[in-house]
Amino acid sequence: MTCFRLGLTGSIGMGKSTTAGFFVAAGLPVWDADAAVHRLYAADGAAVAPIAALCPDAIQNGAVSRDRLKSALAQDPGLLAQLEQIVHPLVAADRDAFAAQCVSDIAVFDIPLLFEKGTEAMMDATLLVTAPPALQSARVLARPGMTEQQFALILSRQMPDAEKRARATHIVETLSMDAVGAYVTALIAHIRHGRSHA
Ligand SMILES: CC(C)(COP(=O)(O)OP(=O)(O)OC[C@H]1O[C@@H](n2cnc3c(N)ncnc32)[C@H](O)[C@@H]1O)[C@@H](O)C(=O)NCCC(=O)NCCS
Ligand SMILES: Nc1ncnc2c1ncn2[C@@H]1O[C@H](COP(=O)(O)OP(=O)(O)OP(=O)(O)O)[C@@H](O)[C@H]1O
């Protein structure tokens, strides 16, 4: 039986990583787009040479420095599109390699820009994590170094939560750990039940 692909997404601070942890705890393989970017930016990562050519200031000790990259992006917002042209194909190759070797009945793909970039087309279902705007903003602004301006800029680059809700197959509000843990257990059972009757 082929692997059922569940795309996990949500806007900044909505609880993707925390929810992904429940799938890991349930024994499912989880591919993490942000972790793939971290590997690509590390020394010897495949994104280092092309990013060095685009923005030499972003390189430190043979790796891409996120802080330096953020400074460069703050000075030249147009750089983001060029950065995405380098990073996104490399991330897609990493994701496809993971999908190709999947031997589990269900695999989870934690992808922040799932709907923005149309990657939901390769998923069998999607799960959106969401929370009320006041809770989202309190969570994000509590992060060290985060400012109102930076938060607003990131939000402006992400699809509004309401639009994501309209597109998602499943939605969970990340209000408490217990509720999300129970939801994930029930969702896995629901997917397995659907497959056994397909
Ligand atoms: C700009 C960078 C250096 C900031 O790194 P930093 O560690 O400070 O933040 P982090 O990666 O955790 O992102 C913070 C928030 O911004 C969002 N975000 C990141 N990149 C993008 C983007 N290209 N478009 C919209 N939102 C984005 C993330 O989903 C998250 O909600 C980094 O996000 C980056 O290199 N982005 C470009 C690559 C990319 O598109 N990554 C997204 C997942 S594939
Ligand atoms: N189910 C939950 N119950 C209570 N708090 C939660 C829950 N899920 C997430 N949180 C809290 O919300 C904050 C953001 O969660 P998390 O880091 O998982 O978000 P994210 O969507 O991965 O963020 P980003 O898009 O920035 O990577 C954290 O402080 C976390 O503790």
Image: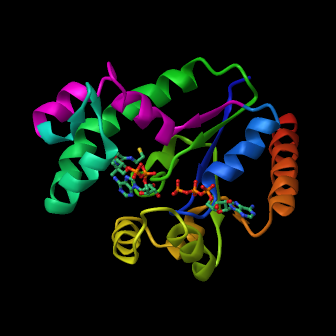
Q: Nearer the viewer, residue 193 or 115?
A: 115
Give left or right: position of 17 versus 60.
right
Q: Residue at x 32, y 18 (%)?
A: 44
Percent of width and height locating residue 189: 88, 44
Which quarter of the figure has residue 89?
top left
Q: Specify the segment rendered in magenta.
A: 29-54
Give left or right: position of 8 versus 55.
right
Percent of width and height locating residue 8: 61, 50
Which residue occupies the extreme bottom position in the image?
134
Q: Residue at x 60, y 64 (%)?
A: 14
Q: Quadrant of the C terminus?
A: top right
Q: Residue at x 18, y 46 (%)?
A: 82
Q: Residue at x 55, y 20 (%)?
A: 100
Q: Quadrant of the N terminus?
A: top right
Q: Against 17, is 175 above or below?
A: below
- What colouring does the structure picture have? rainbow
Which quarter of the figure has residue 124?
top right
103 is within the stretch colored magenta: no
Question: Which quadrant of the figure shows ligand 2?
Answer: bottom right
Q: Nearer the viewer, residue 142 or 125?
A: 142
Q: Nearer the viewer, residue 24 or 94?
A: 24
Count every numbered label the image shows and give the total.
Answer: 0
Percent of width and height locating residue 39: 43, 28
Q: Main secondary structure of the magenta part?
A: helix
38 is within the stretch colored magenta: yes
Q: Is residue 104 visible?
A: yes
Which quarter of the figure has residue 22?
top right
Percent of width and height locating residue 17: 62, 49
